[in-house]
Image: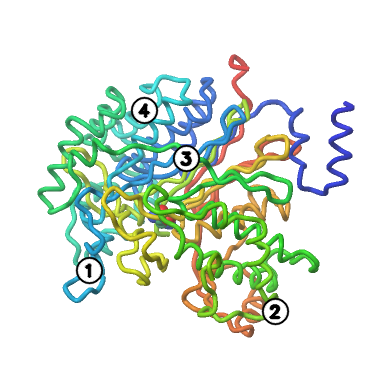
Amino acid sequence: MRHILWIFLFVAVTGCAYQSDIAADTAPQQAVAAPDTFSANAAMAVLQEGGNAVDAAIATQFVLAVTLPEAGNIGGGGFMTLVHDGKPGFLDFREMAPGKASRDMYLDANGKVKPHDSLYGVRASGVPGSVAGMWAAHQKHGSMPWSRLLQPAVNLAEQGFVVPEKLARNIERFVKKGQEKGLSNNFSRYFSKATAGSTFVQPELAATLKRIQNEGKAGFYEGKTARLLADFMQQHDGLITEDDLSRYQAIWREPVQVSWQGYTLVTAPAPSSGGIAVAQWLGMFEQAQQGMTPASHNSVEYIHLLSEIGKRVFADRAKYLGDPDFIDVPMAQLIDDKYIARRASQVNPAAISDSQSIKPGLHESEQTTHFSIVDKWGNAVAITTTLNLGFGSGMVVSGAGFLLNDEMDDFSAKAGVPNFFGAVGGKANEIQPYKRMLSSMTPTVVLTPNKDVALVTGSPGGTTIISSVTQSVLNALHFDMSAEQAVNAPRFHHQLWPENTIRIHSGIDEVKQQELQRLGYTLKQQNFGDLQLIKRTPEGLDAASQRSGRGLSLVEAPAASDQ
Ligand code: DON
């Protein structure tokens, strides 16, 4: 009781920032926020059987490869941020460029970027990383048998699942887009039977998953699956070889860790731009707010302030960020307190700065998917994973039944030319053999001062991921919203270019929109998401999936037999 009293006094003195510390005395709970019902239920079943958050995450990742083909995958890649036994960690299972890739591979004879090559067809694919990632996570932290964790995915592929309406609609849209653009792929052959309400079976995918189930990582990167993939590449003039597959390694990296409003943010380092960007965004916001009347949520002042900060964040992203195994990323300098304070001091809270004048500072639903898990021991896992655009390259490996990514578009095909998400880059992110393309994916865990998990968050959305994650942290912890409010509150995004353009969710008040336009902004309506967030409150865990998606969040006490 005295313990609780001291914490109460501490909270009273420091404001709302450390509320979650009082949750230490609540009964154990476990929570999942996942992008569909199949994956959420599979994750919770693992937790209820006594598995930990990493076990549940592995089961979730494989189920999503079956039931959320827009982004769930074994033919793509992703990042995992975790806190396990109190220790922060980060696993990079991002795709890498094939050995035969080269800097100018997407340029025509006149040096112009060819419009479709990095986005559609097998030449758009990087060497997949997801299976290696799940295997590495299991080797280090798994507590249940690998084979058990693959079983739900095998069952769903073999016996089928009832196709949700939103998936059927996305499939129809993708087929239509392919026809309009005159793309040739084998997507329809595999997915046209997946109509709303029908039971969709995927026998080739089931066989591939069984090889992974029985042989582990080798079931994908060697033997039959590797041969099927390499042959498929050869038949379609693609670049990935069996040698590329056997070289692929998931990499444990040091996560970005920064203090913010008394919390510790644990988030994604390069080759993600996301963690550094979120740290900069939150850090500059905190600095810029000093001595000002606090900006209220989604007010004109707030949107303007975060937009001005975003311009600086994206100028640095374009210049400095890429695969740290190939270039020197000045990570410590980019998140250094003095640097952040200097950049924040250049923001004019009342006027828009000229985009041309914003230079890098040191020297001068399309688809992806995310899920968040907390187990009864307080371990947390956040995974963001992707094929890049919805259904990736649109190419399914014949005989192996899985979609390949189109992640090569995240490289900078030519310095200064924007990619699909409007992100520009230069030398730091140019294509080189075996290099990993820069990402915006930002799986994030936030810890309280005594290292309890306060928040687990992440989102799809290309470059808007960075805004979604930043604003979800602000919503949940700075504005103390519930999980449900935090994921559904309208968001906005500024990424320096196009000049003075804010992408904005529907739902931001009309009058505020007019004021922003008067200030000189052009507003573009766009939906971001879908956020999957778990927050610790004094009453226990609170989880939510953004309503616009087809996700499910679950909070349960551990099974009585397992406590
Ligand atoms: O890694 C990245 O930043 C992108 N490939 C993510 C793509 C994405 O989020 C598409 N989604 N909505």
- Circle 3 is placed at which residue position? 253
Q: Marks 3 and 4: in contact by CB < 8 Å?
A: no
- In the picture, measured across the screen, residue 412 lies left or right of residue 138, that is left
Q: Mark on residue 150?
A: 4
Dot 4: element: helix
**Which disc, if any, is residue 107?**
1
- Badge 1 amino acid: Leu
Q: Earlier in the sequence, mark 4 or mark 1?
A: 1
Q: From the top left corner, tell me how far across and down residue 425 is, in percent.
A: 40, 65
Left or right, residue 148 beside residue 210: right
Label 2: state its secondary structure: loop
Q: According to the image, label 2 marks what residue? A: 350
Q: Amino acid at mark 4?
A: Leu
For marks 4 and 2 on the same chain, the one whose residue lies earlier in the sequence:
4
Q: Secondary structure at mark 3?
A: strand
Question: How busy is the neighbourhood of tag 3: few (under 14 within 10 Å), some, or many (20 plus)?
Answer: some
* Disc 4 and disc 1 in contact, CB within 8 angstroms: no
Kind of residue sitting beneath label 3: Arg
Residue that appears at 27% across and 63% down: 176
- Secondary structure under the numbered disc 1 in the rendered image: loop
Most extreme residue toward the front is 363
Q: CA distance from mark 4 to mark 1?
A: 41 Å
Whether label 1 lies within 8 Å of ligand 1 gets the answer: no
Residue type of the residue flagged with mark 2: Ala
Q: Considering only order in the chain, which callout, 2 or 3, is on the residue closer to the N terminus?
A: 3
Q: Is residue 238 left or right of residue 323?
A: left
Q: Going from the N terminus, do you reach mark 3 or mark 1 first?
A: 1
Left or right, 151 with reference to 336: left
Residue 520 vs residue 192, the one in the foreground: 520
